Amino acid sequence: MTSAMTSATLSPEAVLAEFRDAGALLEGHFILSSGLRSPVFLQKMAIFSEPPRTERLCRALAEAIRARFGQIDIVVSPAIGGIVPGYETARHLGARAIFVEREPGGPFTLRRGFQIPAGQRAVIVEDIVTTGLSARECLAAIQGEPGEIVGAACLIDRSGGRGEIGVPLVSLVALDIPAYPADALPPELAAIPAVKPGSRAMPKP
């Protein structure tokens, strides 16, 4: 289940304005990190390259997390894209910030001595959720930890609430942005050359 929550400091409209003002809300034909195609791409690194903008968004996300889940001790994020928002959100929650990372060619795992001890309450923090794949893989990597994984959070849920993660998800904005398999594109999208602005390695289409 996904719920978009209005923060006391940033409304959903204000969150989208931050993306637009940063040049992070792009239109065209994009290959997403999931391999799906979309007419809209959210270039979150344009946001995270600006510390004041990142601080405003992550402070609002911390408020939404606290309102939904209560006290949080640890924020866990998937590397690489989730590290910056995870750290900044943890700072506003007064929590530790840790991350999962991939072994070469393998799944996400906790390394560097990171742990979620018994009695600690943890939340997964992502930047953008499209299919929920990264968050699900992050959850799978930490489910064996003694601490409690209470939920997940992201700045923008672009799945329209369809990105199942396995724990409750909160977001600052929930958008229903279409995404298509490469072999099932609408004609108007197929007529535009595709670009791949994301960072996750993926096989060629």
Image (cartoon, rainbow, N blue to C red):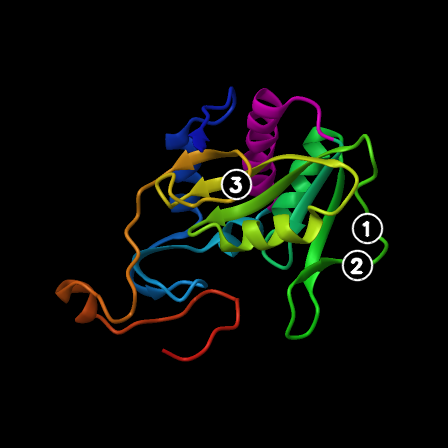
Tell me, for residue 114, which label it has, or none.
1
Residue 138 in sight in this render = yes
Label 2 element class:
loop
User: What is the C-alpha distance between the residues marked 2 and 1?
Assistant: 6 Å
Query: Quadrant where the N terminus lies?
Result: top left
The image shows residue 23 at horizontal and vertical percentages of 40, 52
Q: Amino acid at mark 3?
A: Cys
Q: Earlier in the sequence, mark 3 or mark 1?
A: 1
User: Which residue is found at the position 64% from the left and 58% from the top?
Assistant: 79
User: Which residue is found at the position 21% from the left and 65% from the top?
Assistant: 185
Q: Start and end of the magenta stretch? A: 51-72
Q: Residues within 10 Å of mark 1 (few under 14, many from 20)?
A: few
Q: Is residue 125 left or right of residue 158?
A: right
Q: Which residue is mark 3?
A: 154
Q: Which residue is mark 2?
A: 111
Q: Is residue 86 left or right of residue 115?
A: left
Q: Amino acid at mark 1?
A: Phe
Number of callouts: 3
**Looking at this rendering, what residue extends furthest in the left direction?**
187
Residue 55 is covered by the magenta coloring: yes
Asked where in the image residue 20 lies, by quadrant, the reply is: top left
Asked where in the image residue 16 lies, by quadrant, the reply is: top left
Q: Are marks 3 and 1 in contact (CB under 8 Å)?
A: no
**Looking at this rendering, what residue extends furthest in the front direction?**
144
Q: Are marks 2 and 1 in contact (CB under 8 Å)?
A: yes
The image shows residue 173 at horizontal and vertical percentages of 41, 35
Q: Earlier in the sequence, mark 2 or mark 3?
A: 2
Q: Is residue 107 left or right of residue 120?
A: left
Q: Is residue 165 left or right of residue 76?
A: left
Residue 81 is covered by the magenta coloring: no
